[in-house]
Amino acid sequence: MSDEKKVGLLERQMTRRQFLKISGKSIAGLTVSATMLSLFGCTQQQVDQGEVMTWAMPQGLLVVNAAKCTGCQRCEINCTLTNDRVCSTYISRVKIGRNLHIHGKDGLLNRNFVYFPDTCRQCKEPACGSACPQKAIYADEKGVKKVDPEKCVGCGACVEACPWHMPTVNPETGKSGKCIACGACVAGCPTGALQIVPWDDVTAAAQEIV
């Protein structure tokens, strides 16, 4: 195979708009440059096995590496402490516990399981926003989709409309909450399973041809 054919999607000049096309999807099967692998903090094997996923955020590319996630739920705790001033994994904007995948009947005993951090994809045209009868979900000046607590009535329409059920209605406040790209989950991840790579770094690495 020629070097030209080996060049993968992530090795060409890349912009945030182009990354939106693969946002929230596994990048399995793509040939990733050494520089990009270093930025992502992953290996080509992890990419090929579908353990690395990306979400396009306003400040950079959110990289999720399931192979590094230990299920400690520190990201969920940091999320709620930062945004809600409480410690609650249930209302966290990043979801860990519900994504425990156990492999085989003896999976728990043999630690044959994997956690997967999951959060809002910041869709260009969010289904949650379209479904909200109060138009409480809006995009701020950076394009981040947020919930206006003054308008939200806690009906849960956004939760049902989201393909990944990312918004969560707080049973105490009666208001819905979703990721606002604050980065608290990334800052608190002890293993590097979550990170945000600035767009300038992503573009610079993508321009390198191996």
Image (spheres, rainbow, N blue to C red):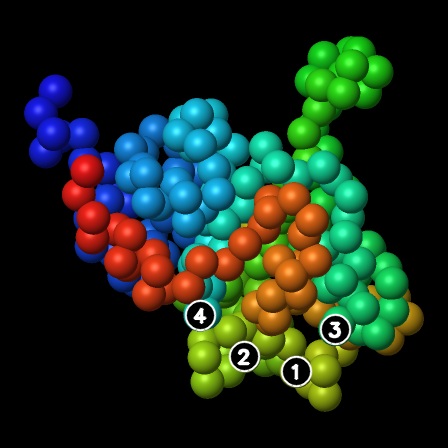
Residue 197 x, y percent position in the rendering: 45, 58
Residue hosting label 2: 138
Q: Residues within 10 Å of mark 2 (few under 14, many from 20)?
A: some
Question: Is 140 in front, or is 159?
Answer: 140
Residue hosting label 1: 148
Residue 169 at least partly seen: no
Residue 14 at least partly seen: yes
How many numbered callouts? 4
Q: CA distance from mark 1 to mark 4?
A: 19 Å
Query: Which of the two labelled residues, at mark 3 and mark 2, occupies the earlier sequence position?
Result: 3
Q: Is residue 201 above or below residue 98?
A: below
Three-letter amino acid code of the residue under disc 4: Pro
Q: Secondary structure at mark 4?
A: loop
Query: Which of the two labelled residues, at mark 3 and mark 4, occupies the earlier sequence position?
Result: 4
Q: CA distance from mark 3 to mark 2?
A: 17 Å
Question: Is 7 in front, or is 26?
Answer: 7
User: Which mark lies nearer to you, 1 or 4?
Assistant: 4
Q: Are marks 2 and 1 in contact (CB under 8 Å)?
A: yes
Q: Secondary structure at mark 2?
A: strand
Residue depicted at 34% across the width and 57% down the height: 202
Residue depicted at 55% across the width and 40% down the height: 65
Residue depicted at 24% across the width and 44% down the height: 11
Residue hosting label 3: 83
